[in-house]
Amino acid sequence: MAITPLPRQRRKEARPQELLDAALELFVEKGFAATRAEEVAARAGVSKGTLYLYYPSKEDLLKAVIRNNISREIAEGEDIVRAFEGPTTELLPYLMSEWWRRIGETKASGIAKLIVSEVRNFPDIAQFYRQEVIEPAERMLAGVLQRGIDRGEFRPLPVHEVVHNLMAPVLFMMLRKHSIGACAGLECPHAPQRLIEVQMDMVLGGLVPREPVMAPPHRKAAGKKR
C-alpha cells in the first residue's frame, strides 16, 4: 500500500521546481544581472537560505533553469530521432514544430533573449549554454540532415550551414516575442507555427534531390533567305 506523503514532505519535494519556475519568470522579466536571489526566494515562498540550500549561487540557479527547460527537451528530441522510422522529410518538420511547441510557446523561450543580451558579461554561463544547448541541438539537427542524405532523401548540401539556416528563423521569433513582440500592437501578425510550416516547405524544396536538367536539343541556325 502506497504511503501518501505529508503536506510538509510534498512541499519540500516540490521546492526545487518552484524555485526554478520563479527564477525563470524573474530572469526573463528583469534580466539575470538585475534579479536578486532574495526576489527569487520570495516569489517561490521560501527564505533566501532555503534557496541557497538547493542552488549555492545565482549562476548555479540559471544553469539549473537552462537544464530544466531546454536541455531536457533536447534530450527528448534525441529520443524521438532515434525511435523515428518514417521518412526524414516528415521527421525534420516534426522536430521544428515540436521545438516551437515545447520551448517557443512557453516561458522558456525567454532564455534565448536572456543569453543574447547578457551572456558577454558572464563567460561561464556562455560556455555552459554552448555545451548544454547549442552543441547538442546542432548535433541533433545535423544527424537528422545526414540521415536524409544517407537515405537519398536529401541532396548532399553542407550540413553545418543548413543547420544554422534551420535554427535562425526560430531564434529570431523567440527574440522578437520577448522584445518588440511584447509591446502592445507590435505582436507578430503571423502564427509562428504557420511560419515554421512555410519555412519547412521552402527548406525541403531545397533539400530534396533535383532532377537533372536536360540540355535542349541543338538546332542548326536557319539560313538567311535571299
Image: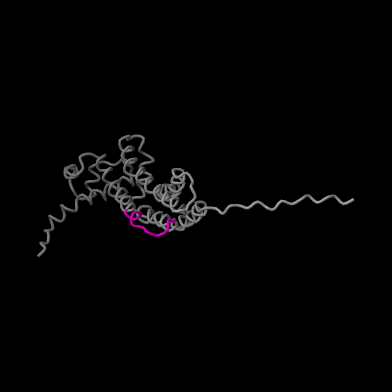
- Quick check: 211 left or right of 126? right
> Please, which colouring scheme is shown?
one colour
The span shown in magenta is 79-88
Does the magenta run of residues contain 209? no
Q: Residue at x 16, y 53 (%)?
A: 13
Q: Quadrant of residue 93?
A: bottom left
Task: State the image coordinates of residue 107 (x, y, percent, origin top left).
Answer: 34, 52
Task: State the image coordinates of residue 92 (x, y, percent, origin top left).
Answer: 42, 54
Foreground residue among 141 and 217:
217
The mark total stands at 0
Foreground residue among 16 and 210:
210
For the view shown, which residue lies furthest in the bottom direction? 1
Q: Is residue 189 above or below residue 119?
A: below
Q: Residue at x 87, y 52 (%)?
A: 225
Q: Quadrant of the N terminus?
A: bottom left
Q: Residue at x 34, y 40 (%)?
A: 130
Foreground residue among 157 and 119:
157
Foreground residue among 134 and 45:
134
- Quick check: 135 left or right of 160? left
Q: Residue 225, can we see it?
A: yes
Q: Quadrant of residue 57?
A: top left
Task: State the image coordinates of residue 81 (x, y, percent, origin top left).
Answer: 35, 54
Q: Is residue 177 above or below residue 131?
A: below
Task: State the image coordinates of residue 102 (x, y, percent, origin top left).
Answer: 35, 55
* Majority secondary structure of magenta residues: helix
Q: Residue 182, can we see it?
A: no
